[in-house]
Amino acid sequence: MTFPIENEANQLPGGAMRKYPRYAHRGLLLDCVRHYFPLEELKRIIEQMALVRLNVFHWVLTNDQGWRIEIRTFPELNRVSGPFYTRDEICELVGFAAERGIEVIPEIDMPGHMTALLAAYPKYSCSGKMVQLAKTGGIYPIILCAGQEKTYSLIETILDEVLPLFPGKRIHIGGDEAPKGEWKKCPHCQRRIREDHLADENALEGYFLTRVIRMLAERGKQAICWNEALMGNHLDESAMIQYWTVNHAEETKRFLQRGGRLIYSDMFSYYLDYPHVCTSLRRVYEDIQMLDDQDVSDRIEGVECCLWTEQIETAEQLERHLFPRLYAFAEMAWNGSVDYEGFLKRLPAFLSEHHPKDIACTSPNEWDVETPDRTAKVLTYMKSVTESMSEEARAVTMEASAPKPAFQKRFAKCFLGR
């Protein structure tokens, strides 16, 4: 098992460890927007990450439901959004992680998932109309205006306040789930499309993101975007792409062939907000999919598991979703998927010795659920996620996330066992 308690023979308790990791980037994404978690809880998780040699904490800090970074130049952001992390708290956590060899990458999602900002400062949308802070998960229709220069000035001002808090070289700017309906009606966005000879609104998003990517490059930072950002075929290759959906697998592969680099976070394998009945311990350990593609394997920066918190309200729920799947992910990220049965034999002793008693962990009888009614349980869970959304978010989400055949096939294989 790939954990950093080595003996003189460079062995780990119960198993050998590679001298060098398989993947340079071995990360965990944690969404602290949909539900806010205090600094002490984040430190407990980071301690366990360090124990198993994960080295990136991807911290989602803005979304439709809140803005969790203190922003002094735009104070309404924090007043409207509720709880947030102060500058001092952010610096404290970044330093705590750095002492344990972990880079903290903040995510400020744009141009979509910006309802929290627009609830405070509506003038930065296309229409300027008031919107309410989102109360549920899902995709929301009002996004930043890509046609007006004041939008880019806003972003520069925010970045200049945020970037000094994070000394690492990378920042995530999202680029996912940005409905283009407002852009299609906006005279500013349509003028931008005409004047810059862009093909359509997807290309306009590529233009928008590339401008932000270059802002960051001027400040010594590399941008990371979700793989939907490639839809417009107009993204600067200096950015790194994070693959989460097979809906854009072909665009992702072309980006890598042009020289881009990738972080792999396939939703069917590494989204730990899904219950074990959807994403079992075995799949987290064994399922590497695209990483074995020889055409692009040398462009893989690493792997990252993700935990979104729309359905996760408490620290105990958070911990049960993470553990022990995070340990399976860590071994795969360092050693590769070597021997799942061997991992299972070693895991109880590791948990007994190294998993703190005050951190929740899913019980062994739930790790690999194979019951006759598994399909019914999966579909019930998916229905509950959809039904928890507001009516507006549900309608936009269903329209924006229409699955392609490859997605449907992968859903059936991974979640339904078909």
Image (cartoon, grey):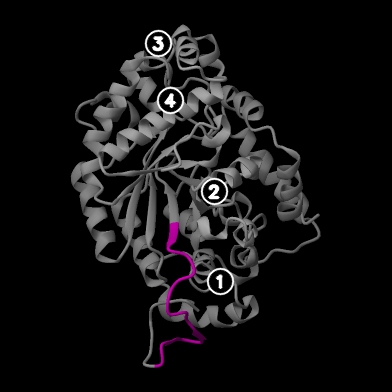
Is residue 134 visible in the rendered image? The answer is no
First in residue order: circle 2 vs circle 3: 3
Magenta part of the chain: 9-27
Residue at the disc numbered 2: 256
Residue at the disc numbered 3: 128
Q: Quadrant of residue 394?
A: top right
Q: Quadrant of residue 338?
A: bottom right
Residue type indicated by callout 4? Thr
Q: CA distance from mark 1 to mark 2?
A: 22 Å
Residue type indicated by callout 2? Leu
Crowd tier of the residue under label 2, counting other residues whose Cα lies within 10 Å: few below 14, some 14–19, many 20 or above: many
Residue at the disc numbered 4: 115
> Measuring 30% from the left and 27% from the top, which residue is drawn there?
77
Residue at the disc numbered 1: 336
Task: Tell me residue 339's x, y (percent).
Answer: 62, 78
First in residue order: circle 1 vs circle 2: 2
First in residue order: circle 4 vs circle 3: 4
Is 105 displayed left or right of 316 in the figure?
left
Residue in front for this viewpoint, 321 or 143:
143
Q: CA distance from mark 4 to mark 3?
A: 12 Å
Residue type indicated by callout 3? Gly
First in residue order: circle 4 vs circle 2: 4
> Measuring 57% from the left and 68% from the top, which residue is drawn there?
363
Numbered disc 3: secondary structure: loop
Task: Tell me residue 272's x, y (percent).
Answer: 54, 55
